[in-house]
Image (cartoon, rainbow, N blue to C red):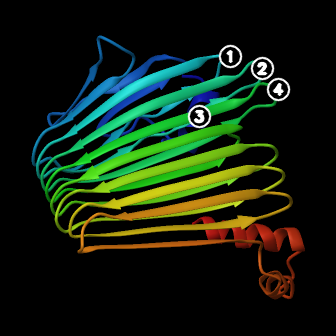
Amino acid sequence: MDELQKSMLEKIADIHEVPEGAYNIRSNGGLAGRNTTANIDIVTKEDKPGIDIIIKPDTKNESIHIPVILSESGLKDMVYNDFYIGDNADVTIVAGCGIHNCGVDTSEHDGIHTFFVGKNAKVKYIEKHYGEGDGAGENILNPTTIIHIDEGGYMEMETTQIKGVDSTIRDTKADLKDGASLVIKEKIMTHGNQTAETNFVVDLDGADSSANVISRSVAKGQSKQIFNSSIRGNNKCYGHTECDAILMDDGHVNAIPSLEANDLDASLIHEAAIGKIAGEQLIKLMTLGLTEQEAEEQIVNGFMK
């Protein structure tokens, strides 16, 4: 890979050199590098673009990196990645996509990731999206995540849209069995005329299952965001969804949290807060010697951590 591609890998996957453990690096629609381990296998799909990641039961403290890079203007890339996490495994999966577009054509990456989390397995999934380039072409990213968590399983999902993505539709669907848990932490930054739509649908089917969905976002310029979150309690369960958004300039955010209790012992909560940066916060930082712009940047950076 060239220096540009290496720089993109650092931004989306914190990769400074060849990662340890299992990895699959996709660049401009093709395979740029792969490694498997004794406990983690990566297999190319034969019927459509994408890979199967197979993690053996009882695998502990291993990581998988599966970043995607697009540096050719006008390229549309689509992948189907399936993750099979064995019972009692404990792994970290680092994904993400970076687009560098210096042309006039639209570059787009759409990924459908399906997770099958085994009994008492634990997964941390980190996904970052980033766009750059001085061309007129748009950068589009549409991730779809489908999650099935078996009894006692746990998955934590951290998704971050850093900047430079002109349009994104982010769909996540999950179903949980007895004692399963799901934690989703989303961070989105939009500016200019960018648009971002997020859709979460979680079915708490199992007894004592739980889900916690938290979204933090900042809408700058004339950008527009839509946040849809639906948690359905179909058994004795606990569900919480929260959306906090900061508006700047002429930004627009529409938050639509939804709860559906289909069991007497379903406990469901939703919270939503949208507003501009408080004036007293700016004044406090400006008395320390910061300009108004620097104070805004400090507040936004702290909010998005």
> In percent of the image, x 57 and y 57: which residue is there?
187
Residue with the mark numbered 1 = 74
What mark, if any, has residue 103 been given in the picture?
Answer: 2
Kind of residue indicated by mark 2 = Gly
Q: CA distance from mark 2 to mark 4?
A: 6 Å
Q: Earlier in the sequence, mark 3 or mark 4?
A: 4
* Left or right: 224 in relation to 234: right
Q: CA distance from mark 1 to mark 4?
A: 11 Å
Mark 2 Cα-neighbour bin, 10 Å: few <14, some 14–19, many ≥20 = some
Q: CA distance from mark 3 to mark 4?
A: 16 Å
Q: Is 243 or 6 nearer to us in this picture?
A: 243
Mark 3 Cα-neighbour bin, 10 Å: few <14, some 14–19, many ≥20 = many
Marks 1 and 2 in Cβ contact (< 8 Å): yes
Q: Is 274 or 109 nearer to us in this picture?
A: 274
Q: Secondary structure at mark 4?
A: loop
* Relative height, residue 196 to residue 282 (above, below): above
Q: Earlier in the sequence, mark 1 or mark 2?
A: 1
Residue with the mark numbered 3 = 141
* Left or right: 206 in relation to 27: left
Q: Secondary structure at mark 3?
A: strand
Disc 1 vs disc 2: which is toward the camera? 1
Q: CA distance from mark 3 to mark 2?
A: 17 Å
* Left or right: 163 in relation to 126: right
Kind of residue indicated by mark 4 = Ala
Residue with the mark numbered 4 = 136
Kind of residue indicated by mark 3 = Leu
Kind of residue indicated by mark 1 = Gly
Quick check: can you spot residue 252?
yes
